[in-house]
Each structure stands twice: as C-alpha cells, then as structure tokens.
Image (tube, rainbow, N blue to C red):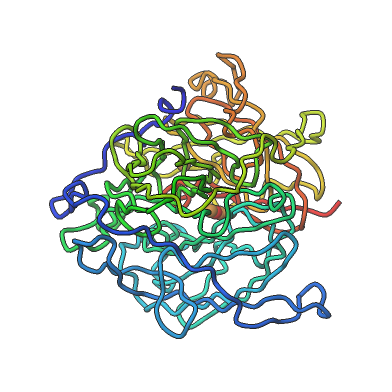
C-alpha cells in the first residue's frame, strides 16, 4: 500500500539503549483503559467579544505528578493537567462544548522550575537565558483568535498563567490541546501535556451516532521507558546538543496506559482517535481482519462512512471511527499497529441492551474547494539540512528560519493553494493553525532537478487525489517524500499571527515551523 511506503526513517525500529525497558516484555492487557473525565467549568465570565453574555470559565493547572502506566511498572513521573487543587492526569481532562459556544480557559503553569527531560540549549527559544520550564497551550484544530492560539514565543513560566478565549465557531470535531512552547515543545508533550477537546453540533446530533459511554476518545502515542519505568527521552550523544531528529518509542500508550483492555458490549462504538506521538506514524487495524467505518477526519465528519480494514494517522491527525462488535459476544478483538504491535484489546461482553444508535449512509456534505477559488498559489519547500557526516541537523520550511520575517500573508476571507514541495526522504505531517483545508493532490517530482534548476518543479508522475480517508476537512496533511502535496484553504475567522509547521515535534522544535499572518483586506 502506498501509505506504508511513505515512511522514510519513520519505519526504523526504536533505538535501543542499555537502560531502555523493552515494552514488549511486559504483560499485555492487564490494565483497564482509562477514560479522561469531562472537565466542568469552575464558573462563568463575560465573553471578551460580547460582555453581556456569560460564557463558561475553566481553570486548568499544569502539574507534575506520578501514575502507573502499566500494572508492573513503578509510578512514572509525568506532566499533566488538573482541575481541582491538587493532582493531574495525562491525557488531561476532556473538554466538551458545542459549535459557537465560546469558553475561557485559564491555563496555569504550576510545574516545577526544572525540566526532567533533556533540553537542547542550542535550539531557538531554548537558549540558556530562558527559563527551563515554559509552557503555552495551543488548541490544535481550533478556529481561535491569535492572542489565544498559543503563539510559541508567548509562553508562561512556573507561577504564571494565561486566559485564552476559544469561540469554537466551527463544525463538530475532536480537537486536541497540547503544549506549544518554542524549542521544548517535543519535551513538554512527551512529558504528558496533551488532552482532547470535543466540539459538537446539531448536524452531528441528528445522526444518532453512538454516544455517552459508547463514544470513547483514544489518544495514542509512543514513549520510551527506562528500567525504572520512567520516561526516557532519547538523546544524540552530544551533551551540548542532545536533540535527535525523531523519537520513536517501543511502548504505545492509549489514554496514558500501556496495552490496556476495554470491555465493550456487542454493539456499535464510536472511537475518536488521535495520534499524539512525537514522530511515529500509526497504521491501525483490528486483528482477524475485522472491518470498521471511518466517519470523520481531523476537522469533522466525512460526507459518507468509509469501510476500512486499516487506518493510518500521522502525528497530529485524528480519525473518527465506528466499530461494530455485534455478534462477537465473548471474544477478544485486538487493535494492532503495523502488523505486530498489540496496542489494546477489546473484550466483548454480553449485550446490556438494544443498540439504538445508527451508522447513517450520509453524514455531512463536504463542499469542495476548487482551484478556481484560489487567488494565490504558494510554493513552499520542506528541506532537511544535514551536518558534515550526513546526520540531519535542522529541518526548514522554504529554506528559511523561524525568526526571519513573515513571508506568508494570506488576505482574510481569501482562498489559497499551498504546494508543499517535499525535498526530503521523510514524510512530514504539515499542520496549519486557524484554518481547515482540503487536499487537492500529491504528485511526484524530480528532487535532484529541483535543486539543480533553482527550485523548478519537474513532475515525474501523475497527480494522485487524496486517499478516501483524507477526503474531508483536514488541519494536518502528510507531505510524502519526493512529492508535491497541494492543499487548499480559505483563511477565515481572524486576522493576525499564527504558525504552520511539521507535526513531528523534533522537527517543529528545530526550525520546521514558520509564522504566517492573516491580513485585512
Ligand atoms: Cu498540534 Cu501547532 O500544533
Ligand atoms: Cu494547531
Ligand atoms: Cu517533519
């Protein structure tokens, strides 16, 4: 399958360290799947855009805490999110709101003054004069005003907080919140700073999809543990420059547990999947070839359900799935990654009642953005800079650094095509803040000729449309190696400064992120 080929280095096994725990040596399916609580507002405050209206106010603290990530591991130190006066979880609590129902969150940094993962002070934003611990929360997929979007340079140190306004003027979808601090984002997310944020609306309500306890977020990401059961973020071997180009763990966690199980009834379930890994691409399937339906992408419902036996998610991407366990009473169904790794197990119990939920044939229209709507096409290259011995040293967008002047200035309410010209050997999941987009196509080009001829693209193959599982609204797209991936977006909502970047967090932290600015007409 095309998807499996486009992995580049991402398919290499995790590096082994002398002190690394082999996750495969632990017993499987001994812990129940944790399900994060839905967070409740602590009060209400006047809306920043209409002070006559009160909107919910949440106060969420980032804290260091310990929890068992597997029955046979010691408690693992992590960073997470907590509501009450003490404690935290990772993933953090789940937000649930409705389209157009704005809310305010005060994100409070109550973390210690020192980081427990290896900071590389040679990376932008993480210089020795900066506080070691800095956080700024971003709502990934949110149509959020710029001052609340979590600009990577606008971080808070321990003891500080920021109040962000999320208007949620967008379609039903599962978004996610995570840290975005410049230069240490990969470490903060690896430490545990992420959680789910669900937006609902009337279109979704009317579909009668499985809900309540039959709808479950599955937040998946890989980690490396040491022999003490502590998070072990791999380093380069150069103590002055510990950054490594990608981190792959052999332990895949679901909602913070290593190979958990979930008891399910023989009926339909809706699973909201997120790949929250730093760098690992997931290729998920159910054992014994059980099929399932995909009903949504990053930014909401597909036009119609898609029958699949495998779903692929790059870091940052989401999939909305319906799995029907009817008729499987008493059996166990394993969710696998690639071909071998058992990610989690579903234990099908006896029916507790009739399944009155539906899987409608038609979900939600996805009006096509056509090329003729675009007023501008931008050619944007993805570039890897190697050091003298050929090791990746930096990743760049358009061959420029983070702190160079803004070059992407889309006009508010205009539509643009962005051509992501991937000159590297890796697939890069490219994410744009603020907007949702559609994938036009992917097309192979001659990378050698591109460099020789000053950035002229010579196509070597036919344009391929998006995979059916990507043919909806997206906010993150896999840019395959040696391909031009074209996306189309309407820049609506707000003017101001945002970012776009690779969602391999090691890349993002090391220059593969650029600002863009939506400007007024
Ligand atoms: Cu998932 Cu810039 O973020
Ligand atoms: Cu984002
Ligand atoms: Cu990348």
Ligand 2 shows up in which quadrant of the image? bottom right
- Place of residue 331 in the rendered image (x, y in percent of width and height, measured from the top left): 33, 42
Q: Residue furthest left?
A: 18
Q: Is residue 388 left or right of residue 36?
A: left
Q: Tell me where residue 35 sits by quadrant.
A: bottom left
Q: Residue furthest right?
A: 521
Q: Is residue 208 left or right of residue 348?
A: right
Q: Quadrant of the N terminus?
A: top left
Q: Judge whether 467 appears above or below 509 on screen.
A: above
* Residue pictured at 32% horizontal, 32% vertical: 339
Q: Tell me where residue 301 sits by quadrant.
A: top right
- Place of residue 285 in the rendered image (x, y in percent of width and height, measured from the top left): 40, 35
Q: Is residue 88 left or right of residue 24?
A: right
- Place of residue 253 in the rendered image (x, y in percent of width and height, measured from the top left): 34, 53
* Residue pictured at 57% horizontal, 50% vertical: 210
Between residues 217 and 87, which one lies in front from this camera angle?
A: 217
Q: Judge whether 428 appears above or below 238 on screen.
A: above
- Place of residue 139 in the rendered image (x, y in percent of width and height, measured from the top left): 59, 60
* Residue pictured at 46% horizontal, 32% vertical: 291
Note whether residue 226 is visible: yes
Note whether residue 403 is visible: no
Between residues 149 and 99, which one lies in front from this camera angle?
A: 99
* Residue pictured at 47% horizontal, 28% vertical: 481
Q: Residue furthest bottom?
A: 85
């Amino acid at each position: 399958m095309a998807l499996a080929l486009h992995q580049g280095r991402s398919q290499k096994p995790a590096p082994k360290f002398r002190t690394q725990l082999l996750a495969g040596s632990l017993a499987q399916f001994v812990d129940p799947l944790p399900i994060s609580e839905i967070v409740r507002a602590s009060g209400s405050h006047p809306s920043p855009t209409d002070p006559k209206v009160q909107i919910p106010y949440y106060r969420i603290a980032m804290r260091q805490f310990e929890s068992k990530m597997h029955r046979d591991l010691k408690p693992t130190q992590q960073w997470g999110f907590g509501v009450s006066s003490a404690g935290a979880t990772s993933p953090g609590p789940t937000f649930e709101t409705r389209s157009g129902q704005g809310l305010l969150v005060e994100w409070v940094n109550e973390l210690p003054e020192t980081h427990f993962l290896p900071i590389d002070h040679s990376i932008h934003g993480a210089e020795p004069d900066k506080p070691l611990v800095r956080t700024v929360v971003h709502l990934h997929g949110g149509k959020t005003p710029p001052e609340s979007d979590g600009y990577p340079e606008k971080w808070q140190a321990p003891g500080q907080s920021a109040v962000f306004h999320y208007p949620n003027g967008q379609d039903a979808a599962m978004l996610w919140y995570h840290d975005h601090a410049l230069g240490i984002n990969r470490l903060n997310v690896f430490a545990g700073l992420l959680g789910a944020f669900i937006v609902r609306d009337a279109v979704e309500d009317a579909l009668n999809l499985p809900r309540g306890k039959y709808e479950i977020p599955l937040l998946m990401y890989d980690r490396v543990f040491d022999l003490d059961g502590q998070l072990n973020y791999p380093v380069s071997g150069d103590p002055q420059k510990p950054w490594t180009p990608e981190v792959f763990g052999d332990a895949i966690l679901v909602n913070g547990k290593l190979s958990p199980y979930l008891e399910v009834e023989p009926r339909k379930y809706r699973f909201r999947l997120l790949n929250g890994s730093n760098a690992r691409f997931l290729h998920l399937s159910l054992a014994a070839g059980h099929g399932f339906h995909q009903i949504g992408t990053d930014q909401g419902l597909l036009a119609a359900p898609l029958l699949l036996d495998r779903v692929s998610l790059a870091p940052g991407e989401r999939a909305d799935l319906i799995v029907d366990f009817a008729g499987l009473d008493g059996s166990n169904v394993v969710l696998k990654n690639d071909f071998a790794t058992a990610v989690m197990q579903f234990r099908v119990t006896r029916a507790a009642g009739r399944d009155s939920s539906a899987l409608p044939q038609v979900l939600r229209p996805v009006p096509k953005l056509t090329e003729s709507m675009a007023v501008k096409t931008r050619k944007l290259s993805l570039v890897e800079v190697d050091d003298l011995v050929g090791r990746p040293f930096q990743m760049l967008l358009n061959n420029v650094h983070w702190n160079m002047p803004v070059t992407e200035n889309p006009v508010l309410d205009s539509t643009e095509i962005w051509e992501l010209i991937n000159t590297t050997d890796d697939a890069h999941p490219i994410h744009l803040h603020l907007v949702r987009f559609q994938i036009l196509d992917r097309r192979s080009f001659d990378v050698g000729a591109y460099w020789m001829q000053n950035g002229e693209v010579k196509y070597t193959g036919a344009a391929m449309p998006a995979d059916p599982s990507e043919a909806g609204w997206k906010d993150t797209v896999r840019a395959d190696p040696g391909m031009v991936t074209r996306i189309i977006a309407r820049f609506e909502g707000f003017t101001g400064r945002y970012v776009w970047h690779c969602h391999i967090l090691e890349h993002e932290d090391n220059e593969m992120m650029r600002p863009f600015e939506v400007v007024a007409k």
